[in-house]
């Protein structure tokens, strides 16, 4: 008998004991107490002894645990089906927490280890975005402002410096800075006698979150946090092979800027070339910023197949505010506005006047990018902006988290039993349970002020965002936020049963090895069970 078969027998044996254990425990407890009055059956069907000691799904008696009883009441077939899905070999050695609750009746469809703490990964963004919608308001807009102190006679020149100040706009782009340069020119200014000064003091100067991995650099997923952000603090590098072997690879950068230096060490190879290791040459090509040195030198190395399609790489930059000011200065140059000075950091002085401004789209549109596309930088900027708006500048993660927790506490979410250290979920210090996600999802669903905007920000399964390729036949009935980093895969959101009953769910899985494909497949099958649930037939 092979190892897998032995494991299956052991697993099924433990599973059988797990089902019997709660019944044996209840019989024993009832006999000892001599009275059924020690047990209370809440509306959700969870049997809770008066001393708050129950038998969890794994058949281990622990204090304070709250879990779904084994196959009891109207959801027995549903729970049996979910338990069967969780026997999948991809979850061997891993840990799973699940809670599924009706938003119509409050019934607990299913719960397993839902009180335990897990790394939420990007599902933590649900806290940040819901709090932002409530505290900043759905119509909140970020500003980026150009200031000047002195203008020459007739307004044709600025006798001092101009100051570009960022107020944490997550979606500021090259075109917006070009529009500011055009506005300045249209006001009559043709020369700036001083410098272009970058003011990023609206937020603190910590470029990364607490507990982020030190080597998570060069990728746009880990772009530096800065009040004066542009293009997500990234550049896009295009790499195109030559037509023949030994031709140089051609590189391009978008936006076209002098802020980064490209070093091209790429080579074109023919389709029949071999590097001696049997690997595909296309996998040996990389574009990486020299992040250890803190420089903006971006080096392309390796091989591309002759005449192959262009590849693109998104690379974060160091010192984002200087990046924004460089793009702005280059825009002024193209508009014919002459600048005598240089680019530097600084602060808008007292007495400076606003000469032009850019206003972002409303927050409702920005949180869509946060939750659908899971943009980490946007979440961090929003978190610090919450802090700045609520507790004054500079905005910090600590101030933002304080405000987020106040919002959650107002919804009666158990903030004493979660750990939140950033806004995006990148940190492995974050800890949240499925119970708490269900509390949040249920509470927001009952908040008419933010419910529609919040739900519209979630990825629609089979349609868009990080759920685009999952549950493709769900017909828009699943809206959720996903999360993933090494060894952790989570998804929380809303689904609608075949009866039209709205349900909140949270599925958290961690401590697995390798890619998450198998784990995601189990999650999708669990969600499919929710979609097909029908009272009176499957329950």
Image: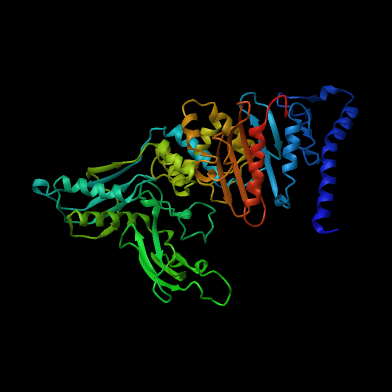
Q: Where is residue 83 drawn, in percent x and y?
A: 74, 40
Please indicate whether residue 332 sits to the left or right of residue 373 in the image. left
- Please determine whether, in this image, residue 343 is positioned above or below residue 306: above
Q: Residue at coordinates 50% horizontally, 29% vertically from top-left?
A: 451
Decide which of 511, 15 is in the foreground and name it.
15
Considering only vertical position in the picture, is 361 above or below 511? above
Q: Residue furthest left?
A: 153
Q: Position of residue 430 (x, y in %)?
A: 58, 47
Q: Percent position (x, y) of residue 28?
A: 89, 32
Colouring mode (rainbow / by chain / secondary structure / one colour): rainbow
The answer to whether 143 appears left or right of 10 in the picture is left
Quarter of the picture holding the N terminus: bottom right
Q: 350 or 367, which is in the foreground?
A: 367
Number of labelled discs? 0
**Left or right for 34, reference 342:** right
Task: Point out residue 500 in the picture as x, y percentages from the top left corner.
Answer: 60, 26
Query: In the image shown, does 201 or 413 lie closer to the viewer?
Result: 413
Q: Above or below — where is 362 with respect to 185?
A: above
Q: Quadrant of the C terminus?
A: top right
Residue 149 can be seen, yes or no: no
């Amino acid at each position: 008998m092979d190892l897998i078969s032995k494991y299956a027998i052991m697993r099924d044996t433990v599973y059988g004991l797990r089902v019997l254990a709660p019944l044996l425990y209840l019989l024993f407890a009832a006999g000892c107490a001599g009275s059924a009055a020690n047990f209370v059956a809440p509306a959700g069907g969870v049997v809770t002894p008066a001393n708050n000691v129950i038998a969890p799904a794994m058949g281990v008696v622990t204090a304070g645990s709250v879990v779904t009883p084994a196959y009891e009441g109207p959801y027995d077939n549903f729970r049996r089906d979910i338990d069967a899905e969780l026997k999948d070999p991809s979850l061997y050695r891993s840990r799973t927490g699940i809670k599924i609750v009706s938003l119509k009746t409050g019934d607990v469809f299913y719960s397993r280890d839902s009180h335990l703490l897990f790394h939420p990964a990007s599902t933590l963004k649900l806290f940040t975005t819901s709090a932002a919608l409530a505290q900043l308001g759905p119509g909140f807009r970020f500003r980026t402002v150009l200031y000047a102190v002195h203008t020459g006679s007739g307004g044709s020149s600025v006798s001092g410096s101009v100051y570009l100040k960022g107020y944490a706009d997550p979606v500021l782009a090259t075109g917006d800075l070009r529009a500011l340069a055009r506005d300045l020119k249209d006001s009559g200014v043709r020369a700036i006698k001083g410098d272009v000064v970058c003011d990023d003091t609206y937020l603190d100067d910590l470029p990364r979150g607490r507990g982020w991995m030190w080597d998570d650099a060069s990728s746009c997923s880990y772009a530096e946090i800065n009040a004066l952000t542009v293009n997500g603090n990234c550049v896009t590098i295009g790499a195109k092979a030559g037509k023949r072997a030994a031709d140089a690879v051609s590189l391009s950068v978008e936006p076209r800027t002098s802020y980064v230096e490209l070093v091209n060490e790429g080579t074109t190879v023919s389709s029949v070339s071999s590097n001696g290791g049997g690997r595909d040459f296309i996998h040996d090509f990389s574009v990486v910023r020299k992040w250890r040195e803190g420089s903006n030198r971006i080096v392309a190395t390796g091989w591309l197949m002759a005449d192959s399609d262009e590849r693109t790489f998104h690379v974060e930059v160091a010192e984002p505010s200087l990046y924004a000011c460089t793009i702005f200065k280059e825009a002024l140059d193209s508009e014919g506005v002459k600048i005598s000075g240089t680019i530097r950091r600084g602060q808008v002085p007292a007495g400076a006047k606003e000469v032009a401004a850019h206003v972002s789209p409303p927050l409702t549109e920005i949180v869509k990018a946060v939750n659908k596309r899971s943009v980490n930088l946007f979440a961090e900027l929003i978190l610090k902006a919450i802090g700045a708006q609520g507790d004054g500048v500079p905005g910090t993660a600590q101030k933002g988290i304080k405000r987020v927790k106040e919002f959650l506490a107002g919804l009666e979410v158990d903030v004493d039993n979660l750990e939140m250290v950033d806004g995006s979920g990148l940190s492995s210090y974050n800890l949240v349970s499925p119970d708490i996600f269900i509390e949040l999802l249920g509470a927001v669903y009952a908040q008419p002020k933010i419910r529609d905007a919040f739900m519209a920000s979630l990825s629609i399964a089979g349609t868009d965002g990080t759920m685009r390729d999952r549950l493709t036949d769900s017909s828009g009935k699943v809206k959720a936020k996903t999360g993933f980093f090494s060894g952790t895969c989570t998804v929380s959101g809303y689904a609608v049963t075949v009866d039209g009953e709205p349900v909140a769910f949270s599925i958290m899985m961690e401590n697995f090895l390798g890619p998450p494909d198998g784990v995601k497949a189990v999650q999708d099958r669990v969600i499919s069970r929710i979609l097909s649930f029908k009272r009176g037939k499957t329950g």
